[in-house]
Amino acid sequence: MQRNLYHHLGWHHGIELFEAAFSTQTFGRHAHEGFAIGAIAEGAGGYVCRGESMVLPAGSLSLMNPEEPHTGHAAAGRVRYNMLYASEDAVRAILGLRHLRGFSAIAPQDRGLKVTHALAALAHRLNTQATADWQIAVEEATHDVLVQAFTHYGGAELRAAGREPAAVRLVRARIMAGVEAGEALTLAELAGEASLNVSYLIRSVKRATGLTPHAHIVQARVDHARRMLLDGTPAAEAAIAAGFCDQAHLIRQFRRHYGVTPGALVRH
């Protein structure tokens, strides 16, 4: 049975994610210093907020502004949800916003389940084995949650992502060079070298190429390993040199990108 987990991202503005799954636990009246962004995945949650008793079925969001008093409980036997907590400063920094309006509706339906899926993706990243690029993957997943929540329900107006061909070429070249040199890459460094803020970088790279910066890093690692394999490097050595945890990690990514395992790579 799934248990409650609480993730604290000390390196990433102190953002937290609560993976909740319970039936009898209750929360007394309380408030959070920052924003609380949640999505009911299973069952139904309930709370009293703004003087109203509410029941939130699966597919509902729970969007709390800072210092919004509320209670909490499972309203129908058992409830499972993911809830992200982020300070106002964290949201502004990650999204590159000067003005932040907050949420007007407390429990709207999640249109297209975009926030629900983004929160689930973040939880999956946090529970996945840490790799060389784990922090970048988590930062991108956190960014996606905030983009979906604040653009659809918080009235945030982000700078429209451009194609930025020169910046995209620079970032891709920097990623390839960093992977080959065995360097630790960060979104902040990539954005700084491209003279863009991180949010705009993520969205512009994805708009121009269909892939996020993290996806480009993984692709570069797979391609680097492939070149070493073709040069005769043993798979275990190629995996470590390309920045993968181990040979099994390389095999999974190699199959995902090329449709075969490294052992099926035949040189002629």
Image: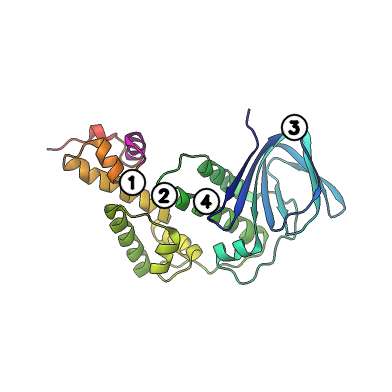
Residue 183 visible? The answer is: yes
Contact, mark 1 vs mark 2 (Cβ under 8 Å): yes
Give the side of residue 266 with respect to residue 80, left or right.
Answer: left
Label 1, label 2: how far apart the Cα atoms are: 9 Å
Crowd class of label 1 (few under 14; some 14 to 19; many from 20; radius 10 Å): many
The numbered dot on residue 243 is: 1
Where does label 4 land, which residue?
141
Residue 46, by quadrant, is top right
- Label 1 sits on a secondary structure element that is loop
The first of marks 2 and 4 along the sequence is: 2
The residue range painted magenta reads 245-254
Crowd class of label 4 (few under 14; some 14 to 19; many from 20; radius 10 Å): many
The first of marks 1 and 2 along the sequence is: 2
Residue at 64%, 33% in the rendered image: 3
Counting every numbered tag in the picture gives 4
Asked if the magenta segment contains residue 30, the reply would be no
In the displayed structure, 219 sits above or below 164; it is above
The numbered dot on residue 23 is: 3
Residue at 78%, 57% in the rendered image: 68
Residue at 21%, 46% in the rendered image: 227
- Which amino acid type corresponds to the residue marked 3 in the rendered image? Ser
- Label 4 sits on a secondary structure element that is helix
